[in-house]
Amino acid sequence: MSHTIAAISTGLSVSAIGIIRMTGDDCAQIGGKVFKCISGKPLWEAPNRKLVLGEFHDREGRVIDSCCAIYTRGPHSYTGEDTVEFHCHGSPAVLSAGLEALYIAGARPAGRGEFTKRAFLNGHLDLTQAEAVIDLIEADTADAAANAAGQVGGRLQKKLDPIYDDLTNLCSHFHAVLDYPDEDIEDFGLDAYESSLRADADALHALLKTHNQGKILRSGVAAAIVGKPNVGKSSLLNALAGYDRVIVTEVAGTTRDTVEETVMVGKTRLRLIDTAGIRETADRIEAMGVERSRQAVENADLVIYVCDGSRPLDEEDRSVIDFCRGLPKVIALINKSDLGTAVQPSDLPFDTVIPLCAKTGEGLAELAQTVDNMFASDTPCDGSILTNTRQADAIRRAYEAMLRALEGLSLGLTPDAVLTDVEEAMEAMGEVTGATVREDITARIFERFCVGK
């Protein structure tokens, strides 16, 4: 018998509607102690999955809200257990008082992610779906939400299941022949499975390749804005952010540390990092900022180089250009186009150069289109993109084990040696879906969740 847990699932801010959620074998009995149906019937006799009107009472028995309750009987619920939800007016005082009354009536506080954890443990969600729930809650772009929703719907599981089934068939055939030699079982030969093993390895590799896009989808593009001091880097960040996020002055070296702001540029979410101007300096504090700027560039997905287009390039400019030369993704901006054109696109050794004025907004639309084109992908955001680092690590280990199995096959190793690697791949894949995940890992996963989900 599972203990009944309760939590506010809509947060504690003023809103039109607030929901208190309960799950557990006796949730209707506990809920019935504080909620009285207008019909006069007890809550545990309410029709399944239908809202019923009633009065919610606090610990002192006072009516604190006229609201609705819905009783969903297990196993046909989110958690697989009996659940009750109270749909109240969204007053934090009402929700807190109602929750306290439920605790006194016998429920206990829900832990972080405990509702979804029960859904996983009761077999209603596999681990890919459970982890996608929090990704959906935290999604801050439509693409991220669409991909998370696809994974909640089982898209990732559907990609992994055929691979796992193939490997299960291979291992079961080998062990059946080994354990039951007198039975009429088709002879086992590894060569017959080579093509399917290779296809399964390719499928894992294709999924693993989506993780770079997944990291961007989940966290945004890390974009470092670099240039010598006083070329308009902070003005550019402020223009893209839509407000004065960074202090802007004519004094060179105003920005002495990296400043980060997340903005939407076109359809792409950028984690803009405004860096200290890169130059040689005797100022110890500024030098520390310059070093952090260099580190930000080395870790960035995109580097946005900015120069002052109203002045000819000098040695400080060329030093930064040399630093950026050869980086995989660089966009060069010739800023302050309203003040003159001393620098031409042909003067800069980059494939993408855009004249721009951060002050007036000229060129920002072209920058947005360029960023969208640079990070566009053919992989649809329908759950096919691997966004979870833990899952990606397990898929990587599964893929590497498959490569070892294929190498062993080509070297003519015995079937039991090859299948050791195949079973290792299956073990790693099981960590993704939850088939073989340990209890401590499960607990760690659900620590990311919010209370009430």
Image (cartoon, rainbow, N blue to C red):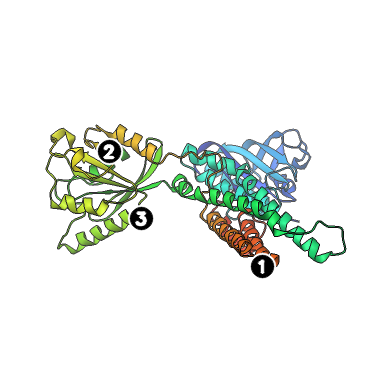
Q: Residue at x 26, y 44 (%)?
A: 350
Residue 377 position (above or below residue 391): above
Q: Position of residue 98 (x, y in %)?
A: 61, 45
- Front of the two marks 1 and 3: 1
Residue marked by disc 1: 417
First along the sequence among labels 1 and 2:
2
Residue 443 position (above or below residue 270): below
Q: SS class of the residue under badge 3?
A: helix
Q: Kindly check if marks 1 and 3 are in contact, taking CB atoms under 8 A apart as contact.
A: no
Q: SS class of the residue under badge 1?
A: helix
Q: Residue 100: in sight, yes or no?
A: no
- Taking depth in this image into account, of 19 and 378 the one nearest to the observer is 378
First along the sequence among labels 1 and 3:
3
Residue marked by disc 3: 299
**How far apart are labels 2 and 3 at the CA level?**
23 Å
Question: What label sits on residue 120 in the rendered view?
Answer: none
Question: What label sits on residue 239 in the rendered view?
Answer: 2
Q: Position of residue 349 (x, y in %)?
A: 23, 45
**Callout count:** 3
- Taking depth in this image into account, of 161 and 292 the one nearest to the observer is 161
Q: Residue at x 53, y 38 (%)?
A: 146
Q: Residue 274: in sight, yes or no?
A: yes
